Amino acid sequence: MKTMKRAVPATIAIATAALLMLSAMLTIAVAQDGQQSTPNSAATSTAESGVSQGVSHTEWYTLEVDGSKQWRDSAIDLRAGAQVKITAEGTVTYAKGNQFGPEGIPRTIKDVIHEYAVPNGAHGELIGRLGSGDAAETFEVGISATYTAPVAGRLFLGINQSARDAESASGVFQVKIELLNAGLSTPDAAQVGGPPETAVPAITPRLLDLIPRRVTDQKHSPGDSVNILIVGTGAEVVKAFTSAQWVEVDGSVESSVLGGVIDTIEKKDYLTMPMSTLYLFGRPQDYGFAHAEPVRVVMSRNHLRAWKSPYKVDGRPLWCVAATHDIGFERDQRNNRVTHKIDPAIDGEREFVNQTLSGTGLVAARGHVVPTHPVTEAKTATGGEFHSDGRILILVLKGSGAKD
């Protein structure tokens, strides 16, 4: 009997300890489950789950976009192929009394020259962006839009306005983001900004030796460096650049003037100001593309020229690109006239092309290569100096099946 009396307290103690341990384990499990239910929601956002017609399970998030801010981080990371539906309401007011909803203010002649993030979008319209850098893809949202992410990236929301507009703005848009499709399940679908860097074996040292290192002007004076090679048909090249919000430039001053007048009448941005003609393989560029804010297009723009080479890679054309960034004006040392001044650090423009095109989801593979006798320091045909690490960017576009 004494033994039994001594055993009871010990048994109770063991049972009590076991219950406390089980309780702690359950508390941890519940806490962990709560953390996993809204993995992408921001601290100031509300995340819920619901059932949508045609979708067995839909996640949605709500947040506010402040009119006095340029961009709002949604804290939602999208995989390639992910689809979201964005709807908005609310009003924002500018100092001059303009009050508007997420659809923005109808465009006027004054909006032709501006500093808005989305070309030809309404002033004050709700917009989106995949990624945070200058090369990030922007798109219109308005009151409602469905967006499919071409590559993985963080979703941002903002207002199509200038920094000056934001300084005097008040009010917010209330935004709801529904995740309709989580995106592709492949490892590459989680690769932010496009495919990972990899070697492109088809671009051999022998092929690189056949490509001129620099382009020339009409008097055969050496100029810009060939710093990008693209594999794809002409149609695929044009699609990649236009999808990345580059525009094909005018081919002459006459077409430039006419295009500018027409765009002004139609209240559109004029971004297609022509660029000078340069030569490679004994002929002018096949394409010229530009990417710029309209208010700065005269003196500052990202731009490039592209030539179809006589060579093919895996049966597809190889394109040679010379890309530079105009940052102002300088004296043309050939004739003492005024010409564009390029950013001497030309590798920045090479990587801007890399980021914008890779962000479209149309690039199958990309990488860098150092050719024999790389160009690291030189002058343009107009006398401006530039420098580089000498690497050439290789972009292999996804095939469309169409022949060039």
Image (spheres, grey):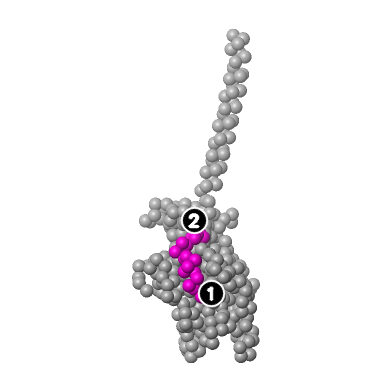
Whether residue 313 appears in magenta in the rendering, the answer is: no
Q: Rounded to the nearest whole Å, what is the CA distance between mark 1 and mark 2? A: 35 Å
What's drawn in magenta, residue-wise?
195-213
List the residue tagged with mark 1.
213
Instruction: Count neighbours of disc 1 (C-alpha within 10 A) and say few if under 14, some if 14 to 19, many if 20 or more.
Output: many
Residue name at image x 58 percent, y 76 percent: 325
Q: Residue furthest top?
A: 1
Residue drawn at (46%, 83%) of the image: 283
178 in relation to 13, above or below? below
Residue 204 painted magenta: yes
Tell me what residue is drawn at x 47 percent, y 69 percent.
Answer: 207
| Type of the residue with mark 1 | Arg
The first of marks 1 and 2 along the sequence is 2
Q: Is residue 379 toward the left or the right of residue 186 in the image?
A: right
Q: Which mark is residue 51?
A: none
52 and 287: which is toward the camera: 287
Which amino acid type is marked by label 2? Ala
Q: Which residue is mark 2?
A: 190
What kind of element bears circle 1? loop
Name the quarter where the C terminus is drawn: bottom left
Whole-percent x, y for residue 31 in the image: 56, 42
Q: How many marks?
A: 2
Give x and y (percent) for residue 324: 57, 76
SS assignment at label 2: helix
Given residues 230 and 201, the one toward you in this image is 201
Pinpoint residue 295: horizontal percent, then vertical percent: 58, 80
Between marks 1 and 2 in the image, the one whose residue lies nearer the viewer = 1
Asked if one can make out residue 333 in the rendered structure from this viewpoint, the answer is yes
Label the magenta part by its dominant secondary structure. Answer: loop
Residue 247 seen anywhere in this rendered image of the structure = no
